Image: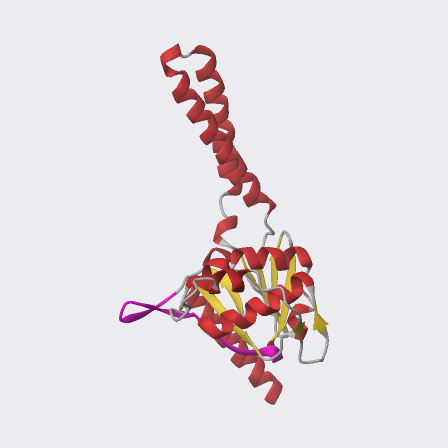
Amino acid sequence: MSSNETGPILIRATSKRNGITTLFIGGVALLISVLWLMFAPDWLFLAGVFFTSASLVTLLVGWFKLREPDHSIEISPDHILYHHRRGNWIIDWDNVQRVDCPRVRQGLDHVNIEAVGIRLKQYAPFLSTVSPRLATHLLMEQRPLLLHNFDKNCASGDCFNQELFDDKHFTLETGEVLTGIKAMLANRMTQLRGRLGYDIYVSASDLDRSPTDFVHLMRDCQQARGDSASS
């Protein structure tokens, strides 16, 4: 994380780290595996194939790391900006109702999930900033969250499938009616608010610290925003 007096606070995702190193290791391993297949005895051929496959996977991981934006989140006095290779979303501080780590039941206890939840005051300003590509990614990424606090009274067992592909129209606070992928995202946000209490979820892999520490940072920024607005 880096910042200065006038610039935003920049959060570098842990998933972005060591991209060049991973790519280099994958390249070296691929070279070794090629030599292995060329000169190793026949009884080691299968092991060489597995080693080559592992090298290619390592190269892909390094490549995807390098494709990610340098910073996943920018926190400014006015808004929170999330960066992804598929697009961005923006949440103004005035639209943030609450930020915390969502908790789920695990036996008799409640535990935090590895994410930060943001509860919005209104959906319309947020959804207007999300591209269809990023909306599709968010729907895929957040599917596991639907399994938390699942409705055990669903006798048919189809509740999860219905929520997974909830593509009915969604009416915003402004009266605008959403259809398609953005309507699916809005419906998903409503479902997750009912399950976990929040609308937007930032994965721990997008952060440079623990979710709990990031929540503290967000609350400090929100408090500073409120203090500056009232002064």
| Colour mode of the rendering | secondary structure
Whether residue 125 sits left or right of residue 101 in the image: it is right
| Residue closer to the observer: 219 or 161 | 161
Can you give x and y, in whole percent of width and height, for residue 228 in the image?
A: 60, 83
| Residue closer to the observer: 2 or 171 | 171
**Highlighted magenta segment, given as a residue range:** 94-112
- Inspect the magenta stretch and tell me whether residue 106 lies in it: yes
Question: From this viewpoint, is residue 19 visible?
Answer: yes
Figure check: 163 above or below 95: above
Image quarter for residue 209? bottom left
| Residue closer to the observer: 117 or 189 | 189
Image quarter for residue 177? bottom right
Figure check: 112 above or below 40: below
Main SS type for the magenta part? strand
Can you give x and y, in whole percent of width and height, for residue 185 in the image?
A: 60, 65
Image quarter for residue 8? bottom right
User: Residue at point 64% right, 53% down?
Assistant: 86
User: Residue at point 62% right, 71% down?
Assistant: 91
Whether residue 127 sits left or right of residue 73 in the image: it is right
User: Residue at point 41% right, 16% down?
Assistant: 45
Residue extending farthest front:
156
Residue extending farthest left:
108
Can you give x and y, in whole percent of width and height, for residue 215 in the image?
A: 46, 70
- Inspect the magenta stretch and tell me whether residue 1 lies in it: no
Whether residue 144 sits left or right of residue 111 in the image: it is right
Can you give x and y, in whole percent of width and height, for residue 52 in the image?
A: 47, 25
Quadrant position of the C terminus in the picture: bottom right
Figure check: 38 above or below 163: above
